[in-house]
Image (tube, rainbow, N blue to C red):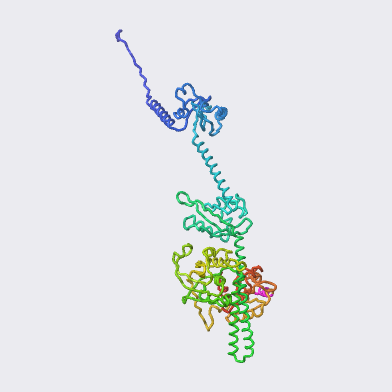
Amino acid sequence: MLKPSAVSVSLLALAHDISERIEAEQQVIESEQRLARILASVSDVVCEADLQGNLIYVNETGYRKFGYTEEDFARGLSVIQMIAPEDHEQAGENLKRILTGEDIGASEYTGITRSGRRFPILIHSTPFMKDGQPAGLMAVIVDITEIRESQELEQVVTEELRNERDRIQTILDLVAEIVVVLEKDGTVGAINRKGCLVLGCQEEEIVGKDWFEYFIPAEISDSVRVIFDELIAGNIDLVERYENPVLTASGEVRIIDWHNSVLYDEEGGILNIISSGTDITDQKELEQQLIQAQKMEAVGRLAGGIAHDFNNLLTVISGSVELAEKESDISGIQTRLETIQKASQQAADLTSQLLTFSRKQFSLPVLVQLNAAVDESLKILRRVLGEDVQLEIETTKESVPVEIDPGQLNQVLMNLVVNAKDAITSGGTIRIRTDRIELGPEMLQARSDMEPGEFALMSVEDTGEGMTLEQKASIFDPFFTTKEPGKGTGLGMATVYGIVTQHGGLIDVQSELGSGTSVHVYLPISSLVDEEVETEGGKDTRLRGSERICIVEDEDAVRDLASEILTEYGYEVFTHGDPVEALELLMALKKKERPDLVIADVIMPGMSGVQMVSELKRKAKGLKALLMSGYTDDALEEKGLAGTEYELLMKPFTIEELCLKVRKVLDNTD
């Protein structure tokens, strides 16, 4: 039993573990602190506003950028205070659209600081939600001053560049020559007005297009592009001057004399190729006409001497024929025939030399022995000189092989000798000399395209009046002449210069007034050698064959002669005198009956040889053809028969010439 004074006390204690909550709260505090540090370090303004635009939060950048303090924030600060008054209306409309959930992206305004400084800003805004309803918005404000200044600077620079380009274009348009700027990929970067006129296009039709694809003739565009690409790659040096054709809008080809330069960047890399050019098409055509006139002038000089020579040869031929008719002894007849044959060959040589000066022809370099070529020219040269000028020849005993068009070599020698004769007033001497000589770098300083080495020398020296230094300096200029009016075109030495340089040579002229003139022509020594000829039974094996050949020739004597020669050398030959009938007969033949080769005269009554063989080849794809003609190149051109795809044999021809040409065509596998 308890005592009355005793008190009973009971204690009830309840305990809850709140360590997780405290830890979570600590994590939230740390996260908020971390976020605050991040926002404080951001270079853009980050802020939070309520639905009325009043700022709930702004980071440190916001205070610095707009010049406000935390006290200003505590008193109340709105987003609208950061925007210039003229943009308030637009900002309000954008706020309403954002709060309705519309994504309007970034909006550009003029920002304004507490001190009134203005600067361009971009505001990126997005609403934040509470219970499914917009409760305010988050915004990032970006200072775009540097961007705008950069854009403005870019606009200024662009405008300055445009003005500078227009100024340069105006200057280029004033230039009388064509000016083209090529980019590294071969496209046209710029072209002046003259270039547009020559090409027949507007500037916008040219700039940006591939120069080689659109404005260089197709047959050479690939090769020219390869050279351009090699130049851009730095593998080859720039050729400062060259002639090149361009293709105009009308399809016409114009010849341009180009001068080139390279524009480099600061590191030495190629930026552009700049070319200025002169249209020399008309000049080239005029030069060709005047060169032809100059040739005809030389022909006039030859006419008297050649007529005399032909009369002599005809006398020999006709006399030998009469004597042969009276001969009863075979050996006597043989002697007369040999005389006739020799006189005929001399007549053919005279004709060939005359045509060399009177006809137009392309350069066809072949292996020529210089000494032999000079010797062959002597008779005709002596006819030109007359009796009052002595001609001396001094040829080297060494072989002097060169690669040159024989006709053009004759023209060079003829022009030099004629000039030397005209420089001699009354009696004198002309000396022609050949030699092999070494040329060192000092002699080739003016010709960077030539390598030192051994050259063939052909000199023409005279004892005439000589020239002054001024005359000598202009000796190769077209139309320059020291002769009296009416006695020369002034193209003789210009022609010589063109031919020699075309064949990789050079000319050196030594002259003093009153001491005569020496012209030294240097041509590269050829490494080619004459082939040794094998014979069988006394006949050249290169000439023989067994193929089947059809000859179509309206001249009975020529047809019969060609047939007899080819038959003698092993070929199976049949002939026709009429090209129309021959075409019908040949078209009717079966494949195994067709000839291996058709030889046709170029110009015949009823149908040309070109037309006939072209018709035949449409049916017989593999048929081979050889054309014959006694006409000059320009005569064939007038008749539209020049420049065919077929080999051409010029009349008169020798047995060797005929048979070698036949074998060349038959052995060609193309």
Q: Nearer the viewer, residue 80 or 507?
A: 507
Q: Residue furthest top?
A: 4
Question: From the image, which quarter does the N terminus lie in?
Answer: top left
Q: Residue furthest bottom?
A: 328
Residue at (57% x, 71% y) in the render: 422
Q: Nearer the viewer, residue 124 or 204?
A: 204
Q: Is residue 642 visible?
A: yes
Percent position of residue 372, x then y: 52, 76
Magenta stretch, residue numbers: 581-589
Percent position of residue 634, x then y: 63, 69
- Residue 482: which quarter of the image? bottom right
- Residue 632: which quarter of the image? bottom right
Q: Which residue lies furthest to the right in this view?
A: 606
The stretch drawn in magenta includes residue 615: no
The stretch drawn in magenta includes residue 586: yes
Question: From the image, which quarter does the C terminus lie in?
Answer: bottom right
Q: Check the image and report above or below for 34 versus 615.
A: above
Percent position of residue 215, x then y: 58, 56
Q: Check the image and report above or below for 312 versus 86.
A: below
